[in-house]
Amino acid sequence: MPRERGEKVVATNRKARHDYTIEDTYEAGLVLTGTEVKSLREGRASLVDGYAFVEGGEAWLDAVHIPEYNQGTWNNHPPRRKRKLLLHKEQILKIHNKTKEGGYTLVPLKLYFSDGRAKVEIAVAKGKREYDKRQALRERQDKREADRAMSSHRALGD
């Protein structure tokens, strides 16, 4: 019986949603060492340069930075290492087939604890072009301005 309930987010990759168009998302478990889990429980991790890939029928997460545990001894973990993802075979096959197509990649979106277990949300994503990013930014700004105008109009009407 897990001691913790609910979801505790450790790290998010907000830039991924800006740089990529998200197609599918998957929740995967992580194979971690003890010091990695303790470091994550302190809320320390970075997904900025991280990526995932399928190799030999297994899914892997690479270049995710989990800093060394402060109270760790000589057997502390290396901060950036290849970590195995725990997914069903069907999911791995589906992801592998999708990423073999041109332009698709696997990107970690969120690292979190779900009921006491370390999980990562990975996404099959396609890279955005520069003009797509500018258009998305412009749409967001237009929506924000429209919301401001509506709220100020409501405040004057009351």
Image (cartoon, helix red, strand yellow):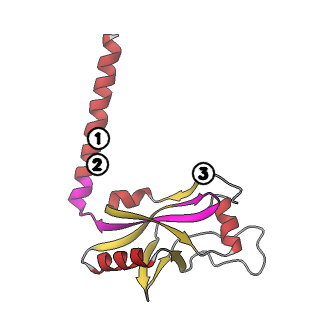
- Residue 68 appears in view: no
Which residue matches tag 1?
141
Q: Earlier in the sequence, mark 2 or mark 3?
A: 3
Front residue of 59 and 108: 59
**Residue type at the position of mark 1:** Gln
In the displayed structure, 135 sits above or below 123; it is: above
Q: Is residue 4 above or below residue 25?
A: above
**Image location (x, y in percent) of residue 102:** 24, 77
Q: Which residue is pictured at 29% across the width and 41% down the height?
A: 141
> Label 2 to label 1, Cα distance in Å?
6 Å
**Mark 3 touches mark 1? (CB < 8 Å):** no
Q: Which residue in the structure is indicated by mark 3?
A: 6
Q: State yes or no: residue 125 in magenta.
A: yes
Left or right of 2, for residue 22: left
Q: Secondary structure at mark 3?
A: loop
Tell me whether the residue at label 2 lies in contact with that at label 1, contact meaning CB atoms closer than 8 angstroms: yes
Q: Of the residues tagged 3 and 1, which is closer to the observer?
A: 3
C-alpha gap between disc 2 and disc 3: 33 Å
Structural distance between the alpha carbons of marks 3 and 1: 33 Å
Left or right of residue 36, residue 149 in this image? left
Look at the image and give the residue range highlighted in magenta.
111-134
Q: Is residue 98 visible?
A: yes
Q: Secondary structure at mark 1?
A: helix
Residue toward you, 126 or 69: 126
Residue 36 figure quarter: bottom right
What residue is shown with label 2? 137
| Quadrant for the C terminus in the image | top left
Furthest residue toward bottom: 56
Residue type at numbered disc 2: Leu
